[in-house]
Amino acid sequence: MGKVTGFLEWERAAPHRRPIAERLHDWREVEHAIAHDVKEQSGRCMDCGVPFCTQGCPLGNPIPDFADAIWKDRWEDAYRQLALTNDFPEFTGRLCPAPCEAACVLNIDQQPVTIEAIERAISERAFSEGWVVPPERVRRSNKTVAVVGSGPAGLAAAVQLDLAGHAVTIYEAAAKPGGLLRYGIPDFKMEKHVIDRRLAISPHIEFICNAEVGRSPTWSALTKKYDAVVVAIGAQRARELVVDGRELSGVMLAMDYLTEQNQVNARELPSAARSVAGKRVVILGGGDTGSDCLGTALRQGAKEVTQIELVPAPPIGRNPATPWPAWPLVFRTSSSQEEGGERTFGFRTTRLEGDGEALVALHGISVERVHGELVDVPGSELRIPCEALILALGFTGPSAQTLVEQLGVRLDPRGNIAVDANLATNVRNVYCAGDAQRGASLVVWAIAEGRRVARSVHRDLSPR
């Protein structure tokens, strides 16, 4: 373990964030990996007899092992141990909500080891020291695999299949690889050079971008060309707001809004047509996507921003309804939410008001939870003036119509792609991983399922 008394001597140190006044004027990452206190934080790990942190991590990362290695100044060993289970610690070290920290024994006192920040520090050290290198080519099989979608699930599947010796081609509908990591995550959470440097060490994987599978090429064509096809297209169908006035100009989907700004930052577009500069903005949705929209709106120069969540606010501090080691449902403040704007909880939108075709206000009513159900609070109606409304209401499943029509792939009752225990669909040699079969979830789950589907594909393609 680290230092035997470390957890008694040192408190949890939160990740380092740049000053708000500074970061609101650029798109650079808010959080910085600073190594000077990483050793101390690693020394807080108690190397519990039952590593709940490892069990809480979908990837099963050997957290006590790499924490101990850092405490002993064996950084390269720490990286080697982490890389055994996690293909992209530079992604999870920035974007994961850290269920491992929720499961940490020290989280009983709400002082978990800063595992996410440690992962980020390890990955940054590994890249700077040159420890992250292209894998040596093993003996190649004569099998070919197409991976459709280059988000975290698709990339993880491709990396593992390449390591297993298969020839892998990734098809991506967008102009560059990365999926949601590139186009859905704002730069202030992860700058895109982080993706590019990872792709640069994957020379054996072929990328075909601007390829909308289902149209060109068709799904049927892929199944004929390749020995196996992995579907990793994500959950792109946005949940809609069904109220009068939805058609007004100024109402937009969160992913359209975020993608456009990311394209502007990458110089793929000259300007943002959906910019909310100088406007009063309302964001419907209190999750991570809504928070990303808030940070983006503030950087674009919105006049004022209000983020609204349908359900009442969760409790501050430990919630007895979600005890350790479960993921705690508690009040959280993201980096974007600490930068400005207002937050409203327990509010249901009833209609949108327009002046001609333009949005001018949102109307709604407060709600409260009664016997587990949300009910309106009489007399609490409210009109909120706004010129822009961003819908961050989550996702309902993948856009799989062409997949169903062309291959006969079945969907489950939720509208996600149906798979068996091996992540195989009902169509021979067609598999699915990530949000397309799970529903909208975490980047760490996507990576875990990409690795898992690669094992299934490799097993099925290997000689018996």
Image (spheres, rainbow, N blue to C red):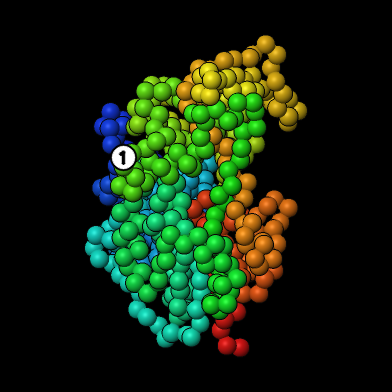
What's under tag 1, amino acid-wise?
Trp
The residue at 58%/77% (across/down) is: 224
Residue 461 vs 4, above or below: the answer is below
Report the front residue among 288 and 386: 386
The residue at 57%/51% (across/down) is: 235
In the displayed orientation, state which residue is furthest to the right: 371
The residue at 51%/64% (across/down) is: 216
Dot 1 alpha-carbon crowd within 10 angstroms: few under 14, some 14 to 19, many 20 or more: some
Coordinates of residue 153 in the picture (x, y in percent): 50, 60
Report the front residue among 168 and 337: 168
Coordinates of residue 379 in the picture (x, y in percent): 67, 11
- Indicate the quadrant containing the N terminus: top left, top right, bottom left or bottom right: bottom left
Coordinates of residue 265 in the picture (x, y in percent): 32, 44
Can you tell which quarter of the image residue 68 is in? Answer: bottom left
The residue at 51%/34% (across/down) is: 252
Residue 29 vs 170, above or below: the answer is above
**Left of 401 or right of it: where is 317?**
left
- Is there any visible trace of residue 12 in the rendered image? yes
Residue 28 vs 137, above or below: the answer is above
Can you tell which quarter of the image residue 341 is in? Answer: top left
- Is there any visible trace of residue 187 in the rendered image? no
- Indicate the quadrant containing the C terminus: top left, top right, bottom left or bottom right: bottom right
Q: Secondary structure at mark 1?
A: loop
Q: Which residue is mark 1?
A: 27
In the displayed orientation, state which residue is furthest to the front: 356
In the displayed orientation, state which residue is furthest to the bottom: 464
